[in-house]
Each structure stands twice: as C-alpha cells, then as structure tokens.
Amino acid sequence: MSSSITFSLVFFLLSLNLTFSLPSKRNSYVQNACSVTRYQDLCVQTLRQFSSVAKNSPSKWARAGVSVAISDNKDVLRYLLKTRRSAFGKRDRVALSDCRELLQDSLDNLHKSLAVLRKLRASEFQQQMSDLGTWLSTALTDKDTCLDGFEKTSTKSSSTVRMVQDRVTTSLYLSSNSLALLNKLAADGS
C-alpha cells in the first residue's frame, strides 16, 4: 500500500474515532453535573442539550437547570390557565386557583434566580448564593404546596386533576434539580 493511501486511511479512522468519542464526552459532562441531583434521569434528559456549552462549569449548569425549570414552569402555568374549570369539583377549583397563584410565584422566583446567575460576582458570591438558595427553595415549596392543595380535595380525582398533579410533580422535580445544581455551584465556588 502506498504511504499516501495508508496516511489517508489512518486519518479517516482517527476522524471516526473522534466523531464517536464526542457524544460520550458530552454525556460525561451532563452525567457529572446531574450526579448531585435527586432526579438524575430527568436531569440528564432535560440538560443534555447544554453539554457542549456548559462542559464542567457549575455556574453554566446551574443556569441551565434554572432555565429548564422556568420553561417547564411556564408550560405548566399555561396548561393550568387553559384548563376548564368545569372539569373540577368545587374543592378542586379552589386548589387549581391556589396552584395557579403558587406557580406564578414560583416562576417569579425562578426568573430572579436566573437574573442573578447571569451576573455572579466574586465580591458578592456568598450573598448571591444565599439569595438564590432562598428563591429556589421557595419555588420548590410553592410547587409542593400546590400539590398539597389537591391532596385535600376529593378522593376520586378526575383525570384532569391527576394530569395537573403529574405536570406539577415533574416541575417540582426540575426545581429540585436546579437547587441541587445551585448547591454544587455554591460548594465549588465558581
């Protein structure tokens, strides 16, 4: 075999190896970031798209986690606003109304958190981490309180109530993951 063909073949094989190793490297970034979360599979599933940008940066993973939580929170809130009140019993309607208010509060706290995460400063880092921890914990508590409201309603929950509970539960899990990613950032300090 001529040396140019051998070189071309070796170069081609090396480029295939690099192509195949990139996705696993990206997967290792998201796996590593999500290792601190309680809902790791959901974390990996929702944050995988940020791997090439966030890599090993705790602050970028924290921003990504909050961004995903905001997007999901908005989707759930839109769903609740579209949900027909006639699909609910009287107590469920009260719980739905409370849940809408709680999710709006949660969304406000998530937005405040993302704004601060975008402007982290070494001189204010500890105070920023404290504020962020409070806001993300409150967002999580709001969703938990929403779910509590539906537990106190009728025992024969409609499929619509169960759908609301499922969507809010997933949103709660995403907020929990974002808080865990924030805690990693606070511990790492970068």
Image (tube, rainbow, N blue to C red):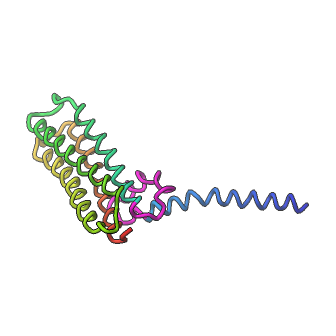
Residue 43 sits inside the magenta stretch: yes
Q: Quadrant of the C terminus?
A: bottom left
Position of residue 181 relative to residue 90, above or below, is below
Q: Quick check: 14 left or right of 188?
A: right
Q: Which residues are magenta?
A: 33-59
Across and down, in percent, residue 181 comes to: 34, 62
Q: Is residue 160 above or below residue 55?
A: above
Between 93 and 105, the residue placed more toward the observer is 105
Residue 123 screen position, x and y as percent? 31, 68
Q: Is residue 63 visible?
A: yes
Q: For the view shown, which residue lies furthest in the front direction?
A: 123
Q: In the rendered view, tell whether residue 94 sits above or below residue 6.
A: above
Of the 4 image quadrants, the one containing the N terminus is bottom right
For residue 5, which quarter of the picture? bottom right
Q: Main secondary structure of the magenta part?
A: helix
Q: Is residue 25 left or right of residue 86?
A: right
Q: Position of residue 152 (x, y in %)?
A: 10, 46
Q: How many marks?
A: 0
What residue is drawn where x is 13% and y is 38%? 92
In this view of the protein, which residue sits in the foreground, 54 or 141? 54
Residue reaching furthest to the right: 2
Q: What residue is shown at x 30% (from left), y 56% (from top)? A: 116
* Rendered location of residue 133, percent (x, y): 24, 62
Magenta segment: does it hold 190? no
- Left or right placement of residue 156 versus residue 27 in this view: left
Residue 1 shows in the view:
no
